[in-house]
Image (cartoon, helix red, strand yellow):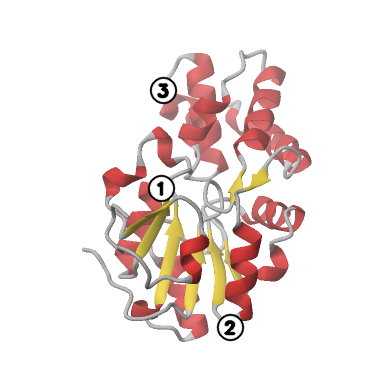
Amino acid sequence: MSAALAQDPALVLFDLDGTLVATAPDICDAVNATLEQSGLPPVRQEQVEAWIGQGSRELLAQALAFARETSVAQARGSPDFALDAIRFDDHYQQRCGARSQLYPHVCEVLAELRRRAVKLAVVTNKEERFTRTVLARHGLSTLLDRVVSGDSLPARKPDPAGLLACMKAFDVPAARTLFVGDSAIDVAAARNAGVPVWAVTYGYNMGQPIARHAPDRLLADLRPLLDPSSGDSSPWH
């Protein structure tokens, strides 16, 4: 069920990959370095973009399954998976921020919202060790009041726990909270938390158009957050 913004938000929550930062180049490089160590063929960045959203372990399992021409369950259950995961972690930690880029207007919008005393948080399924590195290398850490990563809580998106934890921490009700993401997972998490959700059209979303998942509003960039009551707030704005 769609939730409506009662007034300008007091708390804005953001997804990270595909919403604030285009992280796929770094992730693809780390995946391919991991595959190369196992004597497997590389994957394309477009494939990696379709696998982003559920954390690095699931993404790695998808890549290994594709490269080995097997199922994701078999890749995840392989005796080599633990070693592949260690290798990926090392490669990705070294590459975080190397080729990834902020999307347009991210810093200026976050800085202005912060100036207006809006609370800002990231709720991502990316593991904390990578999340912190990406945020720091792109100058976002000081613009955020809270960060909830994929391993911060027992459950991750689309479970609403991360969103609800932020709302509780800042004592902000659902009607004054807004979640901004790029995927069906983000839309589902917002719906499960009972908060409005806006979605950027430039993100990953497993390779599918985000409009199919009927967010409350579609964004070409983040600038409408500075005047959220303007324009048509339907999903087709």
Q: Give the residue at x 43% y 64%.
A: 179
- Mark 1: secondary structure: loop
The amino acid marked with disc number 1 is Ser
Q: Nearer the viewer, residue 195 or 86?
A: 195
Can the viewer see residue 45 in this picture?
Answer: yes
Q: Point out the residue furthest to the left here.
A: 1
Q: Nearer the viewer, mark 1 or mark 2?
A: 2
Residue at 45%, 71% in the rendered image = 227
Q: What element does badge 2 sit on? A: loop
User: What residue is shown with label 3?
Assistant: 71
- Residue with the most extreme right position: 94
Amino acid at the residue labelled 3: Ser
Residue 183's label in the rendered image is 1
Query: Who is closer to the viewer here, 104 or 159?
Result: 104
Whether residues under marks 3 and 1 lie with C-beta atoms below 8 angstroms apart, the answer is no
Residue 80 point in image, percent of width and height: 61, 26
Residue of label 2: 117
Q: Earlier in the sequence, mark 1 or mark 2?
A: 2
Could you give the CA–CA distance between mark 1 and mark 2, rounded to whole angstroms?
27 Å
CA–CA distance between discs 3 and 2?
Answer: 48 Å
